[in-house]
Amino acid sequence: MPSLRRTVAQLYWRLSRWTPVDDAFPREPAVMLGAPHTSNWDFVHMLGLAWRNEADVRWLGKHTLFTGWRGPIMRRLGGIPVDRTNPSGVVDEVLAELRAGRVFQLVVTPDGTRSSQGYWKSGFYRIAREAGLPVTLGFVDRTTMTLGIGPTFHLSGDVRADMDRIRAFYADKAGNKPALRAEPRLAAEERPDAG
């Protein structure tokens, strides 16, 4: 018998104009990129995919999403608040949960601000490398009205080579609002000390 979450997800996809493709979540822990992140609808789509697959997901969100009445709801949905003044604290928290044996997909939106300015945030890279986790490429593409899960691979530590691989995958993915799409690029590619 399907869980309530799976039932809700099935109804959501039946009513949605979007089509999930290749949406099987890895069963091992991974850092999953949600990109291009150009709309708050991306969050709803991510939950829909996760619930459809009955996958345990955790996701990083700015700490202001967890204030007041929203806090318990966001945490129940798998949220981990990020205080941008102390990003290393998030890495430590995620690593502690993994060491305790929790198996989950950590969803990260590295272009986090939903704008086409600047670099991707490098937290996903640091977490994946420090935890020895593979990276899974999740996507949203308005041009085809599809979203899903792409390849999973371990980062090599060669930032530019890893990002070239990520860029190649996302090259034809437009996001929900294509004008807000950010090119996958880390500051560490140009300035190794920025990582």
Image: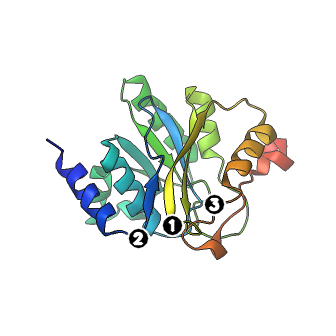
Residue drawn at x 42%, y 55% is 46
Image side of residue 110 versus residue 16, left or right: right
Image mark for residue 111 = none
Residue 48 x/y as whole percent? 35, 56
- Is residue 152 visible in this depiction of the protein? yes
- Kind of residue sitting beneath label 1: Met
Mark 1, residue position: 145
Packing grade of label 2 (10 A; few <14, some 14-19, many >=20) is few
Q: CA distance from mark 2 to mark 3?
A: 17 Å
Image side of residue 61 versus residue 192, left or right: left
Residue drawn at x 43%, y 49% is 59
Count the marks. Answer: 3
Mark 3, residue position: 173
Indicate which label's residue lies in the foreground, 3 or 1. 1
Mark 2, residue position: 17
As drawn, 88 above or below 103: below
Packing grade of label 3 (10 A; few <14, some 14-19, many >=20) is many
Asked if marks 1 and 2 touch (Cβ < 8 Å), the reply is: yes
- Kind of residue sitting beneath label 2: Arg
Helix, strand or loop under label 1: loop
Helix, strand or loop under label 3: loop
Q: Considering only order in the chain, which callout, 1 or 3, is on the residue closer to the N terminus? A: 1
Residue drawn at x 43%, y 66% is 18
Q: CA distance from mark 3 to mark 1?
A: 10 Å
Asked if marks 2 and 3 touch (Cβ < 8 Å), the reply is: no
Scheme by which the image is coloured:
rainbow
Residue 69 x/y as whole percent? 25, 66
